[in-house]
Image (cartoon, rainbow, N blue to C red):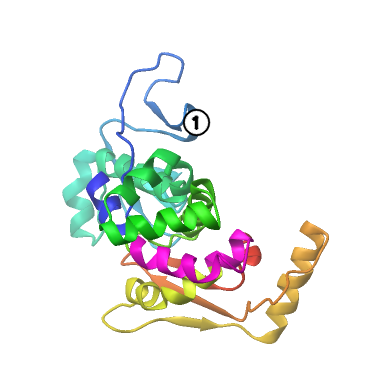
């Protein structure tokens, strides 16, 4: 799992520790980051789950539950009925897979919290000498290493991979002498990394796009005004890119908008 995240997002996830805790209920588990419980769930030992998504349910009796990773409707059924479920065309999921999927989504949703100052320094040290020098010039003349960390955290918050750190540094070096706001720097980085962004989202060379009408732009403006007490400047909330997973679950992959607006998706 850690190798997967390193390859996909360019971030080495800290070691995952499994420990007992008598303070939580039986058959339950908690996922903690920096000692704080981020997510929890109960495992039904001896059962499998079938994600129904609100559609057809198995004929085998079971309990209606919510799948923990995405909150989708599911049914928990005794594992002795596994073959029956397969014959009916369902795909039963065992408890280990459920926990690992839940853990993966928690990590993916909290990538910025996992990127420490030390991690940033390690990532830079692994670059070629020329890019290490470029990073030193940026963080000496225009921003601190903490500022560069903030840029990387914002990218990860939007699920933008930082694996091409050398390209990110080039983009930051172009704008950092003229701009101090982290959000504006991140916007420029996203433009420079557009090929990577589209490539990561494309499915066999096809990029699925959902175009929203101009009325939606006003809806988002009003929502931001109510929440922040101000309008979002230069909003381009008229296009949203979606990707569908194999389970037919529509999933928001990228939102083409200003940084201030994207935090509301």
**Which residue: 55% across, 54% down?**
143
Q: Answer whether residue 146 is magenta in the image.
A: no
- Rendering coords of residue 77 (x, y %): 31, 42
> Is any atom of residue 253 visible in this view?
no
Q: Quadrant of the C terminus?
A: bottom right
Task: Tell me residue 174's x, y (percent).
Answer: 49, 71
**Considering only vertical position in the picture, is 23 above or below 141?**
above
- Left or right: where 213 falls relative to 46: right
Q: Nearer the viewer, residue 180 or 160?
A: 180
Residue drawn at point x = 62 percent, y = 71 percent: 258
Q: Residue furthest top?
A: 22
The residue singled out by tag 1 in the image is: 37
Q: Which residues are magenta?
A: 165-186
Q: How many marks?
A: 1
The front one of 215 and 33 is: 33
Say above or below: 143 vs 192.
Answer: above
Residue 195, can we see it? yes
Q: Residue at x 21, y 44 (%)?
A: 81
Q: Residue at x 70, y 78 (%)?
A: 217
**Overall secondary structure of the magenta section:** helix
With 145 as the anchor, is 74 left or right in this view? left
The residue closer to the viewer here, 145 or 80, is 145
How far from the left and from the top, in percent, is residue 141?
53, 56
Magenta segment includes 179: yes
């Amino acid at each position: 799992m850690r190798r997967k995240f390193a390859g996909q997002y360019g971030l080495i996830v800290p070691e995952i520790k499994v420990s007992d805790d008598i303070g939580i209920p039986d058959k339950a588990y908690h996922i903690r980051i920096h000692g704080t419980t981020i997510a929890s769930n109960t495992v039904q030992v001896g059962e499998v789950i079938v994600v129904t998504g609100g559609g057809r349910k198995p004929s085998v009796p079971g309990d209606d539950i919510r799948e923990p990773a995405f909150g989708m409707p599911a049914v928990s059924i005794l594992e002795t009925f596994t073959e029956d479920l397969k014959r009916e065309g369902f795909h039963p999921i065992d408890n280990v897979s459920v926990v690992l999927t839940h853990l993966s989504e928690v990590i993916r949703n909290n990538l910025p919290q996992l990127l420490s100052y030390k991690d940033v320094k390690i990532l830079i040290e692994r670059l070629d000498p020329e890019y290490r020098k470029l990073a030193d010039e940026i963080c000496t003349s225009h921003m601190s290493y903490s500022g560069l960390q903030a840029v990387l955290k914002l990218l990860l918050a939007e699920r933008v991979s930082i694996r091409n750190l050398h390209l990110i540094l080039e983009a930051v070096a172009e704008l950092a002498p003229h701009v101090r706001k982290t959000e504006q720097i991140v916007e420029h980085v996203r433009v420079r990394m557009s090929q990577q962004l589209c490539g990561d989202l494309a499915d066999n060379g096809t990029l699925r796009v959902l175009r929203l009408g101009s009325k939606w732009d006003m809806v988002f403006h009003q929502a931001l005004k109510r929440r922040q007490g101000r309008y979002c400047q230069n909003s381009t909330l008229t296009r949203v890119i979606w990707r569908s997973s194999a389970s037919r679950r529509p999933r928001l992959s990228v939102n083409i908008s200003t940084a201030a607006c994207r935090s509301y998706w």
